[in-house]
Image (cartoon, rainbow, N blue to C red):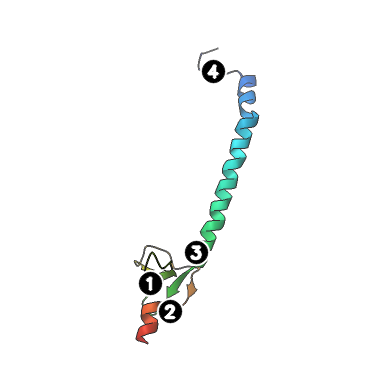
Amino acid sequence: MCKEDEHIINWILKKTDLTRQSEHFNTKKRASAFDQRKRRIDDTMFYCEKCRSIWSYVSKYIDDTNWRKYPRGLIPTIGKKRKECGDCEKIF
């Protein structure tokens, strides 16, 4: 047997170690929490059909207007709710 080859029993013991399993499940929990957060962020973004841009509400300390536009082509428009942005509401 070569030095690099590992015996099957040692391999199984490493894979079934309790600390390794708990780390694996904790990573899955963290990933699922991020997915839930990602959905909430997507729900707060809107697509303005007049100026064809994506925008979202932001905190007052980030922007004084309480909303922010994103550059075209940066964020996909599929699945976004259609709503007029602050600029288009002022103009029309």
Labels 2 and 4: the sequence-earlier one: 4
Q: CA distance from mark 4 to mark 1?
A: 57 Å
Q: Residue furthest front?
A: 61
The residue sitting at 60% across, 18% down in the picture is 7
The residue sitting at 55% across, 48% down in the picture is 31
Classify mark 3: helix, strand or loop: helix
Q: Nearer the viewer, residue 9 or 87?
A: 87
Q: CA distance from mark 1 to mark 2?
A: 10 Å
The location of residue 51, given as percent across then percent down, is 36, 77
Labels 4 and 1: the sequence-earlier one: 4
Q: CA distance from mark 4 to mark 3?
A: 48 Å
- Disc on res. 84: 2
Amino acid type shown at disc 4:
Asp
Q: Which residue is mark 1?
A: 53
Callouts 4 and 1 close, C-beta under 8 Å: no
Give the number of the mark in front: 2 or 4.
Answer: 2
Quarter of the image for the C terminus: give it. bottom left
Q: Nearer the viewer, residue 9 or 89?
A: 89
Q: Residues within 10 Å of mark 4 (few under 14, many from 20)?
A: few
Q: Which residue is mark 4?
A: 5
Amino acid type shown at disc 2:
Glu
Q: CA distance from mark 2 to mark 4?
A: 63 Å
Labels 1 and 2: the sequence-earlier one: 1
- Disc on res. 42: 3
